[in-house]
Amino acid sequence: MQDTRQNDDNTNRPTSHPTRSRWVAEKSNNTLAAFAISLFLAAVPSAALAKDVGGRFGFGGSINAGSGTVPASDNSIFPLATVDALYWLTPRIGLEGRIGYQIQAPDGGDTAVRFRGGFGALFNIARWEQANLQVGLRLLGDVASSGAENVDPNINLGFEVPLRGEYFFSDHFAVNAQVGLGVDVALENNSVGRSTVVGAGTTSSGAFGGFGFIFYL
């Protein structure tokens, strides 16, 4: 009789089981995985909340300082002011055109007016609800003339790679800022707007930055 009760007590007594340990471990792993996924989703911009600019046209202006056309020795060069137009083919791919002017007054050289224009493409690499981050590629050309006698216009061809951020204050108005690198090749052998002669085929490069605004229709 005593042995039967002892066996019943042993049967009813809770005992540890390997299955329970595995269940606790799996539950902990699932909790950690869910937490990691939540952090990832919080860090990555959601397409549902991203600012959609696909199929939209915008125009505006910008002020730019520095580029491949500006040698380090030219210290009296005003920023380049441009009129910009932008059309987004898709939410991520846009086409850009710009035209502008710049006054150059280097020490020891003739004051010149430079007209600069070009076109390029922008790619949205990250999108948020009120902002977009873009990288691009531009092809640019410019002509500078001082009006001095017997001096031909200075002609350059250049490329720029900008990193551009855009912030939307509303659905129709955005401001932008950009930094990047530019490379230019002088196509004419003259010294318009510069303190030294620039030979044909001379290559110059440099960093640039700027800020501007866009009105979207």
Image (cartoon, helix red, strand yellow):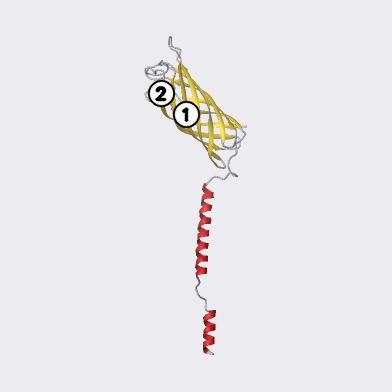
Contact between marks 2 and 1 (CB within 8 A): the answer is no
The Cα–Cα distance between marks 2 and 1, rounded to whole angstroms, is 13 Å
Which residue occupies the foreground of this view, 215 or 180?
Answer: 180
Q: Residue furthest bottom?
A: 1
Q: Residue at x 51, y 28 (%)?
A: 62
Residue 144's disc is none
Judge the density around disc 2: few (<14), some (14-19), many (≥20) Cα neighbours within 10 Å.
Answer: some
User: The N terminus appears in which quarter of the rendering?
Assistant: bottom right
Residue that label 2 marks: 203
Callout 1 environment at 10 Å: few (<14), some (14 to 19), or many (20+)?
many
Q: Position of residue 38 (x, y in %)?
A: 53, 53
**Circle 1: residue type:** Glu
Tag 2's secondary structure? strand
Inspect the image, locate mark 2, and give the three-letter code of the amino acid beneath it: Thr
Dot placed on the residue nearer the N-terminal end, 2 or 1:
1
Counting every numbered tag in the picture gives 2
Q: Nearer the viewer, residue 101 or 135?
A: 135
Q: Secondary structure at mark 1?
A: strand
User: Is 181 drawn above or below residue 125 in the view shown?
Assistant: above
What is the residue that sits farthest to the top in this orientation? 150
Q: Residue shown at 53%/53% (left/top)?
A: 37
Describe residue 39's horizontal placement relative to residue 195 as left or right: right
Q: Position of residue 53 (x, y in %)?
A: 60, 36
143 is higher (above) or lower (below) than 52 = above
State which quarter of the image contains the C terminus: top right
The answer to whether 137 is drawn above or below residue 26 in the figure is above
Which residue carries the number 1 mark? 160
